[in-house]
Amino acid sequence: MSGTTDKTFYLETFGCQMNVHDSEKVIGTLLQEGYRQVPTVEEAGLILYNTCSIRDKAEQKVFHRLADYKKLQAQGKKFGVLGCVAQQEGEKIFERAPHVSMVCGSASYRNLPEMLVQIEAGNRSTGLDDRATDHCFETEYTARTNPHRGYITIIEGCDKFCAYCVVPFTRGKERSRTSFSVLAEARQLADLGYTEIQLLGQNVNSYRDPDGKKSFAELLAAVAEVAGISRVRFTTLSTCSMPCPRSATTCIYPCRAVPRACSTPCSACTRVTSIWSASRGSMGHNATSRLRPI
């Protein structure tokens, strides 16, 4: 990359809250490496797409974007594909879009500084071999886009291998952050003036503290007690990861900051709905009427 576009980048995000938060961390990493974010493709020297492969339409949109902007390669611009499509398609992306310089799955984001050095030198760079890692993508350089709600990833990956889902293949095995690091980030957000926290993971209730100190329910309760935080949300909840759902539901009701709402039981598991109903029965609440998407 040369000229005035040397250290500028444009990033477009497709998909879920996990991708949105991943992009916040990618942006923070790029800013730390001396890049400057710009609002349009035309202004950027590096053009990145953080991709989603859950829906075919989102996947095809990325390749349409790459085809549309191929002509900009003559201006010295570099292109990178990140996220689930990057991991799923791998180096085949280079065949389909030869002007792409970087392909990086979400499990390899911590290697971005080294990958940037490679593409700045005119080489192609791939990050596709880290799905077996035990490490989450943690960085203090997060460029948050919402001034009130802060995302915190507590677990990455999935071990369930449901027949309809690509997540285990694109995001790798389940790996959790320590409760210490999660609570430290929650307190940091509160100190910065954030009032709402959303805990993220493909299966948040599969959370296993590497230090063995807190379950998901205990972590949820601890985040809710952080001074200055008035609301805590979480997504996504998997019913097949709930051997002891009562621990989570009994935690939710007394926590002042956790909304009394959950979309998963209503759509996926009547057994959990009955537990919610029982936990509220003495209070006169109708659980089903209170279940709504968070």
Image: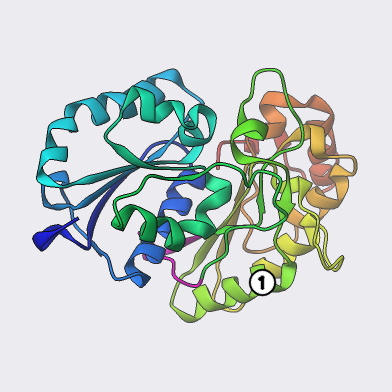
Position above or below: 95 against 157: above
Residue at 18%, 61% (x, y): give it: 6
Q: Is residue 233 among the parts visible in the rendering?
A: yes
Position above or below: 292 against 46: above
Across and down, in percent, residue 127 comes to 51, 46
Taking the magenta stretch, the answer to whether it contains residue 166 is no
Across and down, in percent, residue 179 comes to 73, 68
The residue tagged 1 is: 181
Q: Nearer the viewer, residue 119 or 260?
A: 119
Q: Is residue 240 left or right of residue 70?
A: right
Residue at 76%, 52% (x, y): give it: 207
For the C terminus, which image quadrant?
top right
Q: Residues within 10 Å of mark 1 (few under 14, many from 20)?
A: few
Across and down, in percent, residue 286 comes to 72, 36
Number of numbered callouts drawn:
1
Task: Specify the principal SS of the magenta part.
Answer: loop
Q: Is residue 235 left or right of residue 179?
A: left
Q: Is residue 215 left or right of residue 155?
A: right
Q: Is residue 146 among the parts visible in the rendering?
A: no
Q: Secondary structure at mark 1?
A: helix
Residue at 53%, 35% (x, y): give it: 87
Q: Nearer the viewer, residue 34 or 206?
A: 34
Give the magenta-colored segment's residue range: 140-151
